């Protein structure tokens, strides 16, 4: 069933400009990374998922973003990725940068959720088992836990790196005050935060508005953007109705009520620019994020190879002009 005879394309690293340094670390990440939140669970055909992963790697994507709870069901994406990692990707392990996370509900009881030391270390052990690997490259605390002392969460991250189960650590979705504290704590422990993962896209600029992106930039920490296409909205997936194979039809994370006339009106501005540039809406939307000072990578999702190909191409599109940026910067819901 698995295509273990895969040989990666020998042109996969022919575009050095496809990579950006994460903060002032030693790590280069691809401008376009692939996330496995959706489309890599039990409802996905294994061979299609494997083909998508091969296609990504063949085109220079070295960074694959997971979490303990990605599926469905939770854990399934790590199991699937582990199957590929231990077959067709097995000889490429050192070329891959694999991240996982813990912090959302994963198992029953008081220890399967949030940011305690117990929860984080147990969850990472489970992730390693599911992926059948000894270590991940990057381990994130997935969200801010107001009830657990920050020191407990941060010390667990430090100890995880010292145990060799992760090479780097990162923070996701923390508010600015906790991020400031976290970066300082990790720096003092000599386990610097490699990157912060937050939602930044044309419809949600919270990391800019809240001062998180500028703080990270000023403190030499990378930033990676999740849901850069607002789950497909910015890719024009719903400009002409709701396709039967779309996320709105298949998942609960995006709902039809989002599709207001006002949103449509805003998206038309993006569509207009993309037509003038002879690019797709996804390419312009991703390009806008990559244009923001301090952004290292965007983590796209994709349900087909064609979508991924389209998104990868954004890394090679000409820069947006000031005039185009002026219009895009005014897109707000
Ligand atoms: P996107 O915003 O990129 O949305 C992906 C969806 O958009 C696809 O499934 C597809 O929808 C559509 N799409 C993608 N590319 C194209 C294209 N070129 N043309 C047309 N449609 C396109 O990202 P996700 O929301 O999937 O998130 C990406 C990753 O971010 C996740 O996999 C995860 O790794 C990370 N993440 C992290 C979070 C955190 O808390 N830290 C939270 C959420 C995500 P369709 O399925 O309808 O075809």
Image: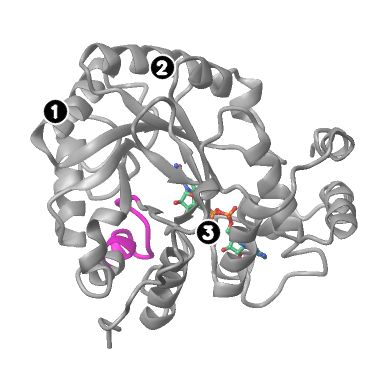
Residues tagged 3 and 2 counted as in contact (Cβ below 8 A): no
User: Is residue 75 in the magenta section?
Assistant: yes
Write the residue at 62% across / 28% down.
293
Dot 1: what SS? helix
Q: Which region of the structure is painted magenta?
A: 67-79
Mark 3 vs ligand 1: CB below 8 Å: yes
Q: Residue 93, position in %: x, y?
A: 23, 59
* Residue farthest toward the left in the current orientation of the protein: 163
**Residue placed under numbered mark 2 in the picture:** 178
Report the residue at 38% width, 82% height from top: 47
Residue 240 picture location, percent across and down: 82, 69
Quote the CA–CA distance across marks 1 and 3. 31 Å
> In this orientation, which residue lies closer to the viewer: 224 or 291?
291
In terms of sequence position, does the residue under pointer 3 or pointer 2 come before the other? 2
Q: Residue at x 43, y 24 (%)?
A: 221
Examine the rendering and report whether any part of residue 110 can be seen: no
Query: Residue at left 34%, top 63%?
Result: 77
Q: What residue sits right under mark 1 in the picture?
A: 159
Query: Mark 2, mark 1: which one is toward the viewer?
Result: 1
């Amino acid at each position: 069933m698995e295509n273990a005879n895969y040989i990666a394309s020998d042109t996969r690293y022919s575009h050095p400009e496809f990579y950006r340094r994460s903060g002032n670390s030693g790590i280069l990440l691809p401008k376009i990374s692939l996330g496995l939140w959706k489309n890599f669970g039990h409802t996905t055909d294994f061979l299609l998922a494997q083909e998508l992963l091969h296609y990504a790697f063949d085109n220079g994507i070295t960074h694959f973003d997971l979490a303990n709870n990605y599926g469905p069901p939770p854990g399934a994406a790590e199991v699937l990725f582990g199957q590929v990692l231990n077959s067709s990707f097995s000889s490429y392990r050192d070329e891959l940068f694999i991240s996982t996370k813990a912090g959302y509900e994963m198992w029953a009881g008081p220890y399967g959720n949030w940011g305690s030391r117990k929860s984080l270390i147990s969850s990472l052990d489970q992730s390693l088992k599911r992926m059948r690997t000894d270590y991940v490259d990057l381990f994130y605390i997935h969200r801010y836990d107001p009830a657990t002392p920050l020191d407990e969460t941060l010390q667990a991250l430090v100890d995880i790196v010292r145990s060799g189960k992760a090479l780097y650590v990162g923070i996701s979705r923390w508010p600015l005050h906790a991020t400031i504290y976290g970066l300082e704590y990790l720096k003092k422990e000599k386990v610097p935060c490699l990157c912060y993962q937050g939602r930044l896209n044309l419809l949600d600029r919270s990391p800019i508005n809240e001062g998180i992106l500028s703080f990270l930039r000023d403190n030499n920490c990378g930033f990676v953007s999740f849901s850069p296409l607002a789950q497909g909205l910015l890719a024009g997936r719903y400009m002409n109705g709701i396709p039967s194979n779309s996320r709105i039809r298949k998942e609960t994370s995006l709902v039809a009520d989002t599709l207001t006339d006002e949103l449509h009106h805003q998206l038309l501005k993006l569509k207009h620019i993309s037509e003038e540039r002879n690019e797709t809406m996804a390419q312009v939307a991703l390009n806008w994020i990559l244009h923001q000072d301090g952004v290292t990578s965007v983590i796209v999702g994709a349900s087909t190879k064609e979508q991924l190909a389209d998104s990868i191409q954004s890394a090679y599109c000409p820069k947006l002009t000031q005039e185009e940026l002026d219009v895009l910067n005014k897109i707000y819901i």
